[in-house]
């Protein structure tokens, strides 16, 4: 028989090593001062309003910075359409045309000779002759006027308008009226329309050189009690006409009806006349766009806008913008205030962490609190000075009307002493706790508690 199976020895159970609790051992014989627990609690409690105050002042500073920058930024202006053209437009004329149609210009002598040939059997009136001349200047040889296939009349578009002269040329169909001329190409290009303003020689004789907006403004007698003086009206119209020509592809300005409408608006008594303030006629226009449909959009320096159709009717009109002067406060000062609020926010978070470590009896808690106190004192003073400068500047700028229209209501002016008083209160409150920390944490009991334990022999 085989030997009986020997029983296995019992397993050896080893005891887990005893882990001693980690404790911050103060100096033998010393006891933790109760004031340290109070400091830990106060640090946590006071860090919360410190964070909130820093965020509040920071957001206000960012808002002030955007207001100051926006008030000094140039206002957006609509782009002015300009196009290079090699044509020689009729004097004082206005055209809406396809740029390709003006690619082959005609000189004034060539246009005059061609008009004489076209109207040899039946001459045109001076008004219509000038409209046809403006059309030739805009269309050039594309008009095909050297070949006249048919000439007749077409009825006017309005009941009080006389019949227009019509021509069928080698390039299409031409209609000439007293205040406009139209060319309709045969092969589907965009129609060409021109509006040459009336000259003084058309009605009462006079100097033919006084044409366009200048002639209309000089001969008009429209006035209004309280409106602009006649000299200023003429100057404004000349500036509008010059900018209208600059924005038109063919360098044509205002039509006579547009000049008459603008003149009557400028001569109206206040409050009807809100476009140009008396005495500011030297620079009343901010922008003028003469588009290809004959519509002229004028933007005045006071924020008013006026849109005139080709026949002088007012398409739209807006009043002047509220006068809002710019801020004079320096953006650099506001940026310094924003930087100091960031520093203050960081110190508040530092204090929160130091308070938590103080309650956990960390040996670094005292050093963190002392570092916070030494940094907080100059930071609170710098924040108070920056806040005083910004408060003084922004408040007085708003009292002068900067940044807001008059119907909102302006705050009162403040003195530099008032601004210092407003900024000194939160700065002084912010310095109280750091001063208390420097006093309490340097007492003998606290210093003895945090003194390193002597090394054992």
Image (cartoon, rainbow, N blue to C red):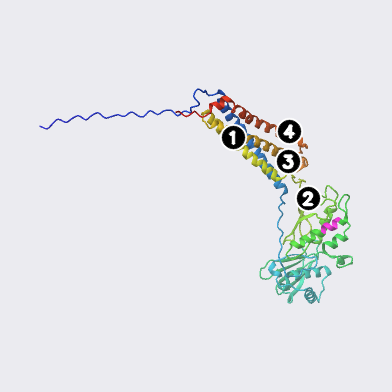
Callout 2: SS: loop
- Please check the rendered image and state whether residue 236 is part of the magenta-colored stretch, yes or no: yes
| In-image side of 415 versus 368 (left or right) | right
Q: Nearer the viewer, mark 3 or mark 2?
A: 3
Compare residues 307 and 36 and report the one nearer the observer: 36
- Frontmost of labels 2 and 4 is 4
Where does residue 363 sit, x and y in percent of width and height?
A: 52, 31
Label 3: element kind: helix
Please tell me which of labels 1 and 2 falls first in the chain.
Answer: 2
Which residues make up the magenta segment?
Answer: 232-237
Relative horizontal placement of residue 29, taking residue 281 as reference (left or right): left
For the residue pair 12 and 420, the one nearer the viewer reads as 12
Tell me which label, 3 or 2, sits earlier in the chain: 2
Disc 1 target residue: 371
Marks 2 and 4, the one that precedes in the sequence: 2
Residue 296: x and y, percent?
A: 75, 58
* Residue highlighted by disc 3: 394
Give the percent coordinates (x, y) of residue 226. Answer: 87, 49
The disc, 1 or 3, on the residue closer to the chain's N-terminal end is 1
Label 2 belongs to which residue? 302
Locate residue 275, reporting x and y percent.
80, 51
Location of residue 258 by image quarter: bottom right
Spatial separation of the CA atoms under disc 1 and disc 2: 56 Å
Whether residues under marks 3 and 2 lie with C-beta atoms below 8 angstroms apart, the answer is: no
């Amino acid at each position: 028989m085989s030997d009986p199976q020997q029983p296995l020895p019992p397993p050896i159970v080893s005891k887990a090593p005893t882990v001693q609790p980690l404790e911050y051992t103060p100096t033998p014989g010393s006891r933790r001062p109760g004031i340290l627990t109070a400091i830990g609690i106060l640090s946590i409690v006071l860090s919360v309003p410190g964070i909130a105050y820093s965020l509040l002042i920071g957001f206000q500073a960012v808002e002030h910075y955007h207001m100051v920058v926006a008030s000094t930024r140039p206002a957006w202006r609509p782009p002015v359409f300009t196009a290079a053209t090699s044509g020689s437009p009729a004097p004082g004329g206005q055209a809406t045309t396809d740029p390709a149609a003006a690619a082959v210009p005609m000189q004034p002598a060539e246009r005059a000779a061609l008009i004489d040939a076209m109207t040899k059997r039946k001459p045109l009136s001076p008004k219509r002759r000038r409209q046809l001349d403006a059309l030739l200047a805009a269309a050039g040889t594309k008009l095909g006027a050297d070949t006249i296939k048919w000439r007749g009349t077409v009825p006017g578009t309005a009941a009080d308008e006389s019949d227009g002269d019509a021509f069928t040329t080698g390039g299409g169909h031409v209609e000439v009226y007293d205040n406009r001329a139209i060319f309709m190409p045969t092969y589907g290009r965009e129609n060409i329309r021109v509006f040459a303003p009336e000259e003084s020689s058309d009605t009462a004789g006079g100097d033919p050189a006084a044409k366009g907006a200048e002639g209309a403004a000089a001969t008009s007698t429209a006035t209004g009690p309280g409106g602009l003086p006649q000299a200023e009206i003429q100057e404004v119209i000349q500036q509008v006409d010059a900018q209208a020509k600059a924005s038109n592809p063919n360098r044509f300005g205002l039509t006579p009806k547009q000049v008459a409408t603008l003149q009557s608006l400028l001569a109206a008594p206040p409050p009807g006349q809100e476009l140009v303030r008396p005495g500011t006629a030297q620079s009343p226009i901010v922008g003028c766009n003469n588009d290809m449909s004959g519509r002229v959009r004028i933007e005045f320096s006071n924020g008013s806008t006026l849109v005139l159709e080709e026949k002088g009717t007012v398409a739209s009109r807006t009043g002047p913008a509220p006068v809002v002067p710019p801020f004079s406060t320096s953006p650099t000062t506001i940026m310094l205030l924003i930087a100091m609020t960031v520093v203050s926010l960081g110190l508040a978070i530092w204090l929160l962490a130091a308070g938590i470590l103080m309650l956990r009896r960390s040996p670094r808690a005292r050093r963190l609190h002392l570092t916070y106190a030494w940094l907080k004192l100059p930071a609170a003073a710098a924040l108070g000075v920056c806040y005083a400068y910004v408060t003084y500047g922004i408040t007085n700028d708003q009292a002068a009307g900067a940044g807001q229209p008059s119907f909102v209501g302006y705050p009162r002016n403040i003195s530099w002493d008032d601004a210092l008083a407003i900024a000194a209160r939160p700065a002084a409150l912010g310095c109280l706790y750091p001063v208390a920390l420097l006093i309490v944490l340097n007492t003998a009991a606290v210093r003895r508690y945090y003194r390193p334990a002597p090394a054992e022999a």
